[in-house]
Image (cartoon, rainbow, N blue to C red):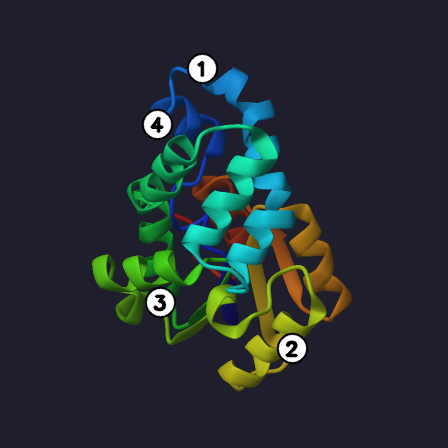
Amino acid sequence: MNIVFDFGGVVFRWHPPSLLARVLPQRVSSPSEGVAAAATFFQNYGGDWGAFDQGLIGADEVVARISARTGWSREEVQRVVDAVPDELQAVPETVALIQQLKAAGHRLFYLSNMPEPYADHLEQHHPLKDWFEAGVFSGRVKLSKPRAEVFQLATERFGVAPESCLFLDDHPVNIEAALALGWQALHFSTAANARAELQRQGLLLPG
């Protein structure tokens, strides 16, 4: 099986409400309060942040746009943008799952909505080439999920058929997009739940 991983919220920690509460406590007093702030700041990964994800604008431009749109100072927005690499810590349980899947003989790839500066950071600080055969970062190809074109590009680059891919992502809209293109897909919540489902499907042995 060709198993394709999303990154943020799957392989790497990504919880914007907690990020905002940690970086800007004067704005966001708690992660629960951060839910609404994160929806405004990141626009559900559309708008300004979506353009950043796709590599259509750079970090300076996304800071300027978010500041103008939210009324937060540029310094505050810059602090959030600068804090993202530290937020993207590898999730040990998912790393263990990756290693188990590799040991079971599956081919592993990634398909991630990720601005180019953060993609560079992940490549420099984590053994992506040991974990995965290949991958696609949205910021480098100027396409992002859930657009069909980025899934099609991924299968072309990986040299695999859509129906041979099992996609793990934490966003339902991306799962729906993959299924519509003939991929298999699994909505990721935790590594433990994903492991149980992969075992149920016979892709991992129990234990």
Mark 2 to mark 4 CA distance (whole Å): 37 Å
Mark pair 3, 1: CA separation:
38 Å
The secondary structure type at the circle numbered 2 is helix
Sequence-wise first label, 2 or 3: 3
Which disc number belongs to residue 152? 2
Helix, strand, or loop for circle 3? Answer: helix
Residue situated in front as seen by the camera: 108 or 64: 64
> Taking 148 as reference, is 114 above or below it?
above
**In the rendered image, the vertical position of residue 196 relative to residue 130, given as above or below:** above
Q: CA distance from mark 4 to mark 1?
A: 11 Å
Left/right placement of residue 83 relative to residue 5 reads left
Q: Which of the marked residues, 1 or 2, is nearer the chain's N terminus? A: 1
Given this view, does label 1 or label 2 mark the residue nearer the observer?
Answer: 1
Real-space Cα separation, disc 2 to disc 3, in angstroms: 24 Å
Type of residue at label 1? Answer: Ser
Q: Nearer the viewer, mark 3 or mark 4?
A: 4
Q: Which residue is mark 3?
A: 102
Q: Which residue is mark 1?
A: 30
Mark 3 vs 1, N-terminal side:
1
- The residue positioned 66% from the left and 55% from the top of the image is 174
